[in-house]
Amino acid sequence: MTNDIFLYFCTLNFTEMNEVLTIDIGNTKAKYAVFHDKNIVESNVFNPLSNDLTLLLQRHPNINKGIISSVGGNLNECLKQLQSIKMIVLSNETKLPFTLTYKEKSKIGADRLALVAAAFAEKPHQNSLIVDIGTCITYDILTDDSRHLGGPISPGMKLRFKAMHEHTALLPLCTPTHDELKIICDDTTECLQSGVQLGVLHEIKEFIELYSLKFNDLTVFISGGDNIFLQNKLKNCIFANSNFMFNGLRFILEYNEIQ
């Protein structure tokens, strides 16, 4: 074997070992992403009550560590399948690259910590607002001196649609639309969609304005599964891709390794 080939295989073996697992168990979905260095090589939704994670480790035998964020339960079921690797369960007790100022630290959602970490990784030492539009809409501030400040929580789009359907006798269950939103509507579905989506849009706009008055040079991240419905409707915002939280989880995992 020549020296060049030997060095190639040494490098290949080293990089293959550098795979980590990130897991996000939300209120509606459980998702995972496998990173090779800083690149995602596999990601998908999974069922925490199945053997999906066991099969995942079989497909990626070089995974030896990971991190999990859970706000939706089924944590222990997942950890049982991951006993062969070193796992960090993200919480307020995890070492973080920012300081928590939240009074009830034990009650802050792990998903919010991961999102703030993602913002820190992308824009460190800068005032940032992270708006996550999922089951609920959350607002978090990361200050330029690396402090996390908790913000309001309000119902997300699907939750608003569901509430109006379940707590009235006649209103149908609707879903968000990509169509033009009107303030003069022709039918009940349009009324509901405009009410919810324009309501969310103007709520977020108002919060951004309020935060911008308080924090100089504010960077605004819009994340979450429903952020796609607000794209091109909010100016001067960074619309994070679907890997934003996974990047935050990977960053926290790396941060804990170097402490």
Image: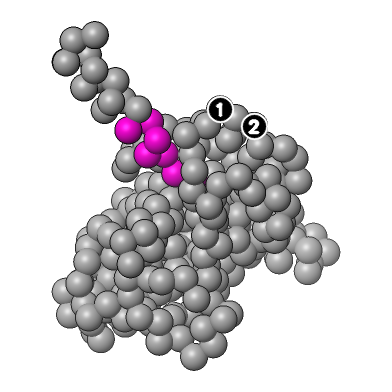
As shown in the figure, which amino acid type bears the numbered disc 2? Leu
The residue singled out by tag 1 in the image is: 59
Quarter of the image holding residue 202? bottom left
Mark 2 touches mark 1? (CB < 8 Å): yes
Where disc 1 sits, the SS reads helix
Residue 55 drawn above or below residue 229: above
The residue singled out by tag 2 in the image is: 55
Q: Is residue 71 left or right of residue 237?
A: right
User: Does residue 7 appear anywhere in the picture?
Assistant: yes
Residue 227 in the image: state x and y as whole percent: 43, 54
Residue 40 drawn above or below residue 258: above
Question: Which residue in the rendered view is the most extreme toward the bottom?
Answer: 103
* Residue numbers of the magenta segment: 14-22
Quarter of the image holding residue 122? bottom left
**At x 53% / y 71%, what residue is drawn?**
91
**At x 78% / y 63%, what residue is drawn?**
166
As drawn, the label of residue 121 is none
Residue 176 located within the stretch drawn in magenta? no
